[in-house]
Image: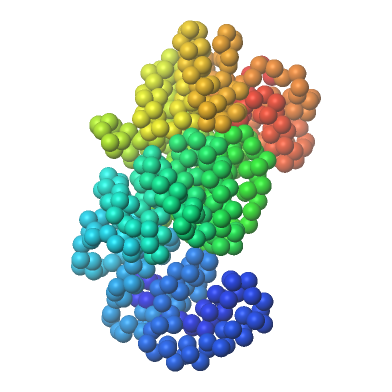
């Protein structure tokens, strides 16, 4: 039986003390205030008012999982033997399903009146949470998108609507429709700017940042993530802190601001965050940072951790994080081509056939990225056709950064095949798109017109574009590290060969990438040796 199959009347006095602690009162004042309510709470406990779904949600939001579970057990006992909680407790089950999928209640047959994705009339309750829960449990993206848009269209901006609206927006993101989420988020963010509390502004800004990342609008993502963290202090975010942090890190990495990204990754996060989907966002962003700074083994570990968690929670949806594609890129950086191909093929198989291009149902951002990575595992002669398919898909999904990335790789493939005219035209377009979305490393990495062809045809491109052609600014130590890195040695192997620490190797690689205008070891020029 699930530990949430029944629900508890916990120590409300203990919970109140937690609330006052969160409010920033000193210990003595917090205890005095809580004691004033102690007798009243004990008198009310028999009615079930002390331990409520709201109190459970607050505990889980703060990452106090064990205390929340105790409260749930007591609430369940208060319902009587054999009785399942109803009404607000069913809403709580949906909320838990979204935030803590490892603790999900799987309702018995007939427990619900209707499929939550078909849904009742939208008011200001938790309809959006039910839609998100239905997506995570049923994995029907098209149905979830239709229902989420209905919630966003009909749910008024009332005091109780925040959870419903934000969950509906997240549903669109997880269904791989960041374009729709952005379209709906814009007017909501405008309304919250003048009419709503800081927590509303913070949540909508964080969602806007995530949609901007997925559309390659890096400067916008950076701005919105900063706004989110400004509207709400770090402590107020609870286990959701990783959401704006992940968007900020992803934006900083795409813009080549690796030191800034490292500072945001150094912000302490609640351990319980890694029991929630927010932890997946954070791990995926950290994996991207590690890839960009020359630590593909560590990045691969982050991506595989995402995969393990998503499988254990039965929410293995690429719209949450496409962990297989992150892992495939890490394998490409490590020269493990066959493993990368298997990961990409698994992702494409999970997406199903391309079918139709209407309404973006089958042509998604995830498919476009997977197609680009699939091309990187092929012989150079076979790449242009596959990369052109990826270009078409990514244009439809409106991810500007990924579009610039695939165009850069297409130009690189044409250059290797001696098709200089095509290469120059494609690279020119890649540079323009990269510059508009603030991706400075990618802008600098695409060769200017008339540049010589890239590395030998047998090499597999793993990064965003062509490396620079000058290495005069590299120190002798950096040159030795770059030479070994370009030959496929890992950071640990390089440290052993050069008798330096792994940390020193990582620092050298960071400087090398900045000087050469590249973002990962797969882009290092082979002439360094």
For residue 135, say whether it is visible. Answer: no
Give the side of residue 129 with respect to residue 240, left or right.
left
Q: Is residue 303 above or below residue 195?
A: above
Give the side of residue 350 with respect to residue 192, left or right.
left
Along the viewing direction, whichever of 339 and 240 lies nearer the viewer = 240
The answer to which quarter of the image holds residue 81 is bottom left
> Where residue 411 sits: x, y (%)?
49, 16
Q: Quadrant of the C terminus?
A: top right
Q: Residue furthest front?
A: 194
Which residue appears at 53% of the width and 79% of the height?
Answer: 16
Q: How many marks?
A: 0
Along the viewing direction, whichever of 180 and 272 lies nearer the viewer = 180
Q: Quadrant of the N terminus?
A: bottom left
Along the viewing direction, whichever of 382 and 256 lies nearer the viewer = 256
> Where residue 504 sits: x, y (%)?
75, 38
Q: Is residue 53 above or below residue 443?
A: below
Which residue appears at 29% of the width and 74% of the height?
Answer: 86
> Where residue 95 sits: x, y (%)?
38, 63
Which residue appears at 23% of the width and 66% of the height?
Answer: 112
Which residue appears at 51% of the width and 17% of the height?
Answer: 427
């Amino acid at each position: 039986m699930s530990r949430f199959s029944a629900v508890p009347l916990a120590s409300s006095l203990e919970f109140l003390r937690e609330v006052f602690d969160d409010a920033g009162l000193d210990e003595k004042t917090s205890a005095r205030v809580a004691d004033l309510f102690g007798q009243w709470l004990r008198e009310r406990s028999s009615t079930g008012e002390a331990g409520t779904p709201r109190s459970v949600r607050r505990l889980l939001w703060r990452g106090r999982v064990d205390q929340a579970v105790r409260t749930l057990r007591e609430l369940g006992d208060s319902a009587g033997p054999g009785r399942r909680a109803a009404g607000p407790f069913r809403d709580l089950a949906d909320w838990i399903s979204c935030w803590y999928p490892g603790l999900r209640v799987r309702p018995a047959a007939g427990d619900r009146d209707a499929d939550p994705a078909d849904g009742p009339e939208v008011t200001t309750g938790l309809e959006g949470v039910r839609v998100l829960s239905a997506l995570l449990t049923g994995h029907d993206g098209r149905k979830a998108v239709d229902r989420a848009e209905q919630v966003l269209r009909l749910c008024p901006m009332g005091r109780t609507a925040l959870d419903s609206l934000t969950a509906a927006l997240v549903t669109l993101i997880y269904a791989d429709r960041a374009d729709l989420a952005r379209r709906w988020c814009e007017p909501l963010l405008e309304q919250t700017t003048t009419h709503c509390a800081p927590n509303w502004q913070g949540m909508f800004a964080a969602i806007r940042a995530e949609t901007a990342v997925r559309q390659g609008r890096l400067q916008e993502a950076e701005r919105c993530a900063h706004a989110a963290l400004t509207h709400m202090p770090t402590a107020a975010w609870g286990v959701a802190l990783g959401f704006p942090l992940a968007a900020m890190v992803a934006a900083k990495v795409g813009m080549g601001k690796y030191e800034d990204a490292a500072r945001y990754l150094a912000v302490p996060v609640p351990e319980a965050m890694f029991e929630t989907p927010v932890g997946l966002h954070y791990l995926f962003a950290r994996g991207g940072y590690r890839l960009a700074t020359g630590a593909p083994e560590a990045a691969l570990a982050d991506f595989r951790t995402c995969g393990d968690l998503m499988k254990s929670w039965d929410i293995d949806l690429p719209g949450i994080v496409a962990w297989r594609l992150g892992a495939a890129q890490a394998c490409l950086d490590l020269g493990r081509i066959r493993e990368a191909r298997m990961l990409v093929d698994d992702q494409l198989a999970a997406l199903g056939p391309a079918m139709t291009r209407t309404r973006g149902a089958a042509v998604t951002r995830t498919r476009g990225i997977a197609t680009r990575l699939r091309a990187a595992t092929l012989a150079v002669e076979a790449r242009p056709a596959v990369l052109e398919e990826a270009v078409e898909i990514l244009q439809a999904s409106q991810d500007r950064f990924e579009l610039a990335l695939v165009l850069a790789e297409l130009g690189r493939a044409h250059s290797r095949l001696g098709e200089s005219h095509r290469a120059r035209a494609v690279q020119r377009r890649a540079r323009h798109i990269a510059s508009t979305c603030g991706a400075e490393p990618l802008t600098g990495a695409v060769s200017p017109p008339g540049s010589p062809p890239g590395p030998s045809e047998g090499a597999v491109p793993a990064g965003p574009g062509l490396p620079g052609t000058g290495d005069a600014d590299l120190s002798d130590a950096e040159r030795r590290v770059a030479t070994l890195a370009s030959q496929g040695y890992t950071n640990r192997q390089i440290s052993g060969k050069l008798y330096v620490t792994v940390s020193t190797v990582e620092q050298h690689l960071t400087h090398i990438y900045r000087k050469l205008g590249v973002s990962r070891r797969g882009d290092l020029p082979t002439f360094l040796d």
